[in-house]
Image (cartoon, coloured by chain):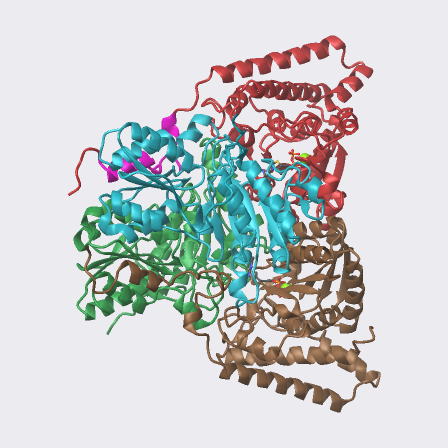
Chain colours: A green, B cyan, C brown, D red
Amino acid sequence: MTTAVDTTTYRDALREALREGLRRDPHVVILGEEVGRYGGAYGVTSGLLDEFGEDRVLDTPISEAGIVGAAVGAALAGLRPVVELMYVDFAALAMDQIVNQAAKARSMFGGQTGVPLVLRTQGGTGRSAGAQHSQSLEAWFLHTPGLRLYVPATVTDAHHLLLAALREPDPVVFVEHKALYTTRSDLGAHAPPPGVSVRRREGRDVTVVTYSRMLHRCLDAAQALAARGVEADVIDLRTLCPLDLEPVVASARRTGRVLIVTEDTLTGGVSAELAARVTELAFDWLEEPPMRLAGEDVPIPVAPALEEASVPTPLRIERAALRLLGRRA
Amino acid sequence: MTTAVDTTTYRDALREALREGLRRDPHVVILGEEVGRYGGAYGVTSGLLDEFGEDRVLDTPISEAGIVGAAVGAALAGLRPVVELMYVDFAALAMDQIVNQAAKARSMFGGQTGVPLVLRTQGGTGRSAGAQHSQSLEAWFLHTPGLRLYVPATVTDAHHLLLAALREPDPVVFVEHKALYTTRSDLGAHAPPPGVSVRRREGRDVTVVTYSRMLHRCLDAAQALAARGVEADVIDLRTLCPLDLEPVVASARRTGRVLIVTEDTLTGGVSAELAARVTELAFDWLEEPPMRLAGEDVPIPVAPALEEASVPTPLRIERAALRLLGRRA
Amino acid sequence: MSRVTSPLDLLRVMVRIRAFEEAVGELFVRGGTAGTMLHLSIGEEGAAAGFGLAMRPGDTFTTHHRGHGVFLARGGDPRRMMAEIAGKAAGSCRGRGGSMHIADVTLGHLGANAIVGGGIPHVVGAALAARHLGSGNVSVAFFGDGAMQQGVLYESMNLAALWRLPVVFACVNNQYGMGTRIDRAAASLDFDARARAFGLRGVTVDASDATAVFETATQVLADAREGRPALVTLDCFRFYGHARKDRSPYRTEEEEREGRSRDPVARLADRLRGEDVLDDDTLTAMRDDARREMDDAVAFALAAPPPDLAALHEDVYAPDRPAPPSVDAYHALVYPEGEARA
Amino acid sequence: MSRVTSPLDLLRVMVRIRAFEEAVGELFVRGGTAGTMLHLSIGEEGAAAGFGLAMRPGDTFTTHHRGHGVFLARGGDPRRMMAEIAGKAAGSCRGRGGSMHIADVTLGHLGANAIVGGGIPHVVGAALAARHLGSGNVSVAFFGDGAMQQGVLYESMNLAALWRLPVVFACVNNQYGMGTRIDRAAASLDFDARARAFGLRGVTVDASDATAVFETATQVLADAREGRPALVTLDCFRFYGHARKDRSPYRTEEEEREGRSRDPVARLADRLRGEDVLDDDTLTAMRDDARREMDDAVAFALAAPPPDLAALHEDVYAPDRPAPPSVDAYHALVYPEGEARA
Ligand SMILES: Cc1ncc(C[n+]2csc(CCOP(=O)(O)OP(=O)(O)O)c2C)c(N)n1
Ligand SMILES: Cc1ncc(C[n+]2csc(CCOP(=O)(O)OP(=O)(O)O)c2C)c(N)n1
Ligand SMILES: [Mg+2]
Ligand SMILES: [Mg+2]
């Protein structure tokens, strides 16, 4: 007789974190478009309105700047708001509130105040949602002093990093991935804190650095590589601020070859910062310049094959790793 | 008898380019806050309203999203709008129109249409204007496929790159620097086109890569370095998209040492992309990892000494170069 | 009613819109469209046809994510539309835009937008261009009631009024933004008052009555052409879910029944039958024609080849400008195969 | 007028605001303030004092770039204000904020904003917090007429009305946004109508009459406390340029003369003299006291040391979180001095 393993989804793991947050801290409120009756465009907040009522879970009009701004004010005035921005693409409508307000209040006002705000949003491709609903814009937040930036790839991290975000005194941008909501696995009881990168697979031949959905594609590629006798060391960054490059550098010093895989567009993206830092910190051990495999420098098309061609796939990751190793694909 | 040399300022050189644009192309219109009666917050458009009238030079209300959006529509409908965003910090209010609309229209609509829009703005420190009026946000635009990005450092480039922008079929983000408006020099009759980097000083010891106001600080530092026997090769990128790294790579192959100097904050900034590319393209010739000297990862404070400490100065550039050369400062 | 557009024209366009939406909805369910989102304008045909037919050739417009109807009313080609929604190269946007970004600039269409409110300010600039170029054209922004809560609308209304531009803001008020009924999104539902408060004319019309929409639109467009912009609220009901698969659990059955009773197609057909302008055979023929036209469009879309992957980097910049290099091409340069490092 | 605030209190606060602005303006001209921008609220004292004194302890507020007056009326300490504007460590924001970002959270101040309209939505959230925490406080956003054209205001008004929040939007209408007179920025000047169109109460008051402002504010704040938010337009005139050195060439002399005749300080002083509540000696003493207080503040600011450069990386994140490393420190790690590479 086997016991049923308690698996859960990324979506449900997020919801449980929100539920726990709402339960343990009366100052937590959730607000955003369709977070209540509809349960969230991707179902993350489903059921929370019924359980916690309209004072804790607030459906808002379609007013991104106003909503994020209201959350900033709520945070300044003693609440711990969790605001859901339905697509990270809509951050473009709220950048003033995110960058000029939330991120700067503490510093601008000389440390008198803080903005304990969690901005949940989701990005990425995978649903042929087109150029305005498929971007990966985390580089904007990485480049903004004052923000923290979490990018969970796994069910367990989705849960625990969100719980951790709910304890931060500073604004956290929490970027989920639309293609991960239905991924399913055990929910771990613990996870390392934000700012700790985790090795998801061990290997001696090439260091692969990634986060969010691309982790899964890297692991798939690593499996294919293993069949060709190449062992990849796959490291999941989990949070981009704080950023933990120690395991990456340690790995790079062993392998001499680093492949950085991100879904955001190449130029000026997160992969650039990672490549620069890896070069800075592991220069003497590198056999090749860190290789960046990222989204193509194009607006993301709707046609599914084009969409998929615009981001790294397991096959492209595999080929890139082989190229980096100087081997024919 | 000496002839008086015709020197002009960055501000006047920009204005002359706008005037020429307004004269030669009846489709050019200028719109923005205070561009008319006031002549622009930094005086660039001064006098143009009187000369060209209210149909060509339009004062707008304080509605950044609306104004940039109107400019996008005007461009889609056959005009060639030049919109002035008073501070690049306010781009945060118009990011949807810049990134989701202007940059994507051509691609999203399958090449049917284009957005020949010039978005003039200015950024940077130098006036103790504080965290919301001093940022250098060009990395946001660098990371947006579909935009072009010009960052003139000199009087001649201010003029000729703006004229070139007025001939582009695609949106150009044109970032001036608030500390350069009063700089004065001869106005060259020609300048290389966008996408051509220019060596501003020759040297064999270290390659210095920069743009906009930091060019002048790098040249000052280069002079101080020369007094110490170090000859810097200083390259001005002039435009970040298109980006011309050829002379940088050629120089790096000679010097083996590259110092990248930008005013924007370090993490996730333009310096990251430049460092990554230089590493990729000149790896085998590098003695040291490309060094990034950029803005500190902090919101920019008002207190003048703190503000100045938050960005590269000639002295800090000099010291960084010496460190890169393995010499005591 | 103008001499050139008859009530039968309105009816025919509405019937075609409905047929298109039904056909594309089925295609979606069969997996033939690109992507997981498809927003149908069934129930909004009166707004689309009534307003669309009142516009003149040369008038420009922007549409929102639920814009098939307006697009068709302005002359959209169902084949190229269907191919676009299927993500095919033969689509009007080469398969890059899909349903939410469908556009055909030859119709004066400045583009559809998946950002709620994103296309609204564009008409301000287009109207500026119209005045500048002396074209005499009006520019119309179509958007949903959800966009009534987007700040950029008020910035745009103020600009249009301040500059006395030939602009009409056309709010297709189908009562819902996703699962949020308009009275849970807006504190005041008097949208005409919002318009007046910004110096524009505000008119609300029952968009289940296509001829009423046409008449209001005709008048409002004429006014706009003279520099008197307006906000027109086109009251209707979203018959189905937000997206094709949403079953609208947030609405009561009664509400749905009542809403669907305001069917613009049935209403005009009934009226014309009552006036003896239309008989059952003509109506049936109209419907059959429309269905055939849309079936043909579906067949065209299904048969059309997908976009060429090699075209991925095209149209980011103008054709005579260098395209961004592909990541693979860049890697080939930086990490040449089989070559050892110096 | 409430029992606790007398007209003399209003006058005294106005006199102090004017003295502060004159003193800081002089300091600016002497080069003693940080930065090239300084926006004085001379002419707006009636708005600041009238509204500020009507608020209760615990009420929260946000201010705009021309906010010294409101800040002072709410209890701001001139020494720490002056030091802040001078960019000194003793300033309330450690010299990081300066004039445009001056704030003191102990006064319920959620922050000043140099983004026109940037602080407006914050009061919606603060009011939500007030209701959530049962504090009974109102939250007030102060902003200029220029912000009436920022979309986020309407998003915020709608949210406040929809959620029936204890919020007041207080527009200090000094007739100008930089060089643009309000009638060249807004197509309709009936701001009360804008409020009503979004479901709020709208009231305009002549802010050269500080007691009228106080009475209106008292009433509007009481209403807001019961969940009836409002937009209050405080009509006044910006006596000097946009920034201290702007000489307003875009205004006529007549306009300036006429505008300055609406001096809130003189108006209340004259009235109180007429009512025999005030004599010349008392007024002179009040002015002298204010001048002395502000001279002292200036002396304090000038004597105060500048911020410690070592503090540059502080307060980006909470004190118990790691600060971002300095670029130099990072370089020292990556390029250790005197060490040869392996
Ligand atoms: C800026 C932005 N916010 C949110 C969304 C997600 N979204 C897509 S459609 C929609 C509802 C829009 O309602 P409405 O404007 O009334 O149009 P309808 O769908 O009813 O036609 C929402 C919230 C979006 N696409 N863009
Ligand atoms: C978003 C934004 N746009 C533009 C500016 C530049 N700016 C600073 S003050 C100002 C005028 C503001 O006018 P108003 O709101 O009436 O305030 P006042 O200066 O009259 O007090 C402008 C345009 C800014 N700071 N922020
Ligand atoms: Mg709707
Ligand atoms: Mg004003």
Return the x and y of residue B29 as percentages of the image width and height: 65, 50
Q: Quadrant of the C terminus of chain B?
A: top left
Residue A85 horizontal side relative to residue A280, left or right: right
Asked if residue B197 is among those painted magenta in the image, a careful observer would answer no
Residue D204 horizontal side relative to residue B281, left or right: right
Is any part of residue D338 visible from this angle? Answer: yes
* Residue A329 against residue B151 in the figure, above or below: below
Toward the viewer: D94 or C256?
D94
Give me the residue at 42% from left, 24% from top. D307
Residue B17 horizontal side relative to residue B234, left or right: right
* Residue B181 against residue C260 in the figure, above or below: above
Residue range of the region highlighted in magenta in the rendering: D309-336
Toward the viewer: C13 or A152?
C13
Return the x and y of residue B208 as percentages of the image width and height: 33, 40
Give me the residue at 46% from left, 77% from top. C306
Q: Main secondary structure of the magenta part?
A: loop
Q: Which image quadrant for residue C40?
A: bottom right
- Ligand 1 position by quadrant: bottom right
Return the x and y of residue D218 as percentages of the image width and height: 70, 32
Is any part of residue A167 visible from this angle? Answer: no
* Residue A239 against residue C270 in the figure, above or below: above
Toward the viewer: D87 or C284?
D87
Return the x and y of residue D264 as percentages of the image width and height: 74, 24
